[in-house]
Amino acid sequence: MLMPKRVKHRKVQRGRMKGKATRGNFLAYGDYGIQALSCAWITSNQIESARIAINRYIKRGGKLWIKIFPDKPVTEKPAETRMGSGKGSPEYWVAVVKPGRVLFELSGVPEETAREAMRLASHKLPVKTKFVSKRDFEEMGGEE
């Protein structure tokens, strides 16, 4: 399960998810990837289950990059606890994902294999996603 080794602050405020991703919104390493179309918190368990789904489908064929990291702690109070008496203890870690963020990248496999692997992974994630390839970004860059 992904989580930071150490953090400066144990508890953080929830914050707001507004706007689009300005970083990590293009393919940096692989030939194919999945890009988020909506914003959400993605937990480390969801990232791990998506990674396993991709690896099981490609059967050690290509190389996979995970482009997001859960660095935000989410606190929860115990069940049946009265309100007040401080903020709860950190229970799990999430990655804040905004629209446009590339979540996973894949290379070394045919496009159809990558497309199906990313489809299986997208079912494990709480965001709407789309399949992207290097070709899509080259076409986009040529128009500007």
Image (spheres, grey):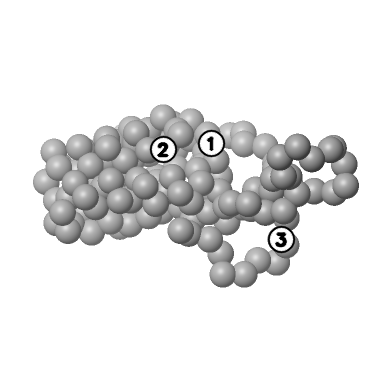
Q: Nearer the viewer, mark 1 or mark 2?
A: 2
Q: Can residue 16 be seen here? A: yes
Choose between 55 and 103: the one closer to the eye: 55
Q: Are marks 3 and 2 in contact (CB under 8 Å)?
A: no
Q: Which amino acid type corresponds to the residue marked 3 in the rendered image? A: Arg
Category of crowding for the residue at label 1, using alpha-carbon neighbours closer than 10 angstroms: few (below 14), some (14–19), many (at least 20): some
- Residue corresponding to mark 1: 40
Which of marks 2 and 3 precedes in the sequence?
A: 3
- Residue corresponding to mark 2: 125
Q: Which amino acid type corresponds to the residue marked 2 in the rendered image? A: Leu
Q: Are marks 1 and 2 in contact (CB under 8 Å)?
A: yes
Q: Can residue 144 be seen here? A: no
The picture places residue 130, in percent across and down from the top left corner, at: 33, 32
Mark 3 lies on a secondary structure that is loop
Mark 1 lies on a secondary structure that is strand
Category of crowding for the residue at label 3, using alpha-carbon neighbours closer than 10 angstroms: few (below 14), some (14–19), many (at least 20): few
Distance CA(mark 1)–CA(mark 3): 21 Å
Q: Is residue 10 left or right of residue 101?
A: right
- Residue corresponding to mark 3: 10
Q: Nearer the viewer, mark 1 or mark 3?
A: 3
Looking at the image, residue 43 lies above or below residue 100 = below
Looking at the image, residue 114 lies above or below residue 12 = above
- Residue, x 35% and y 45% (percent of image)? 50
Q: Is residue 29 left or right of residue 89?
A: left
Q: Which amino acid type corresponds to the residue marked 1 in the rendered image? A: Ala
- Residue, x 15% and y 42% (percent of image)? 113
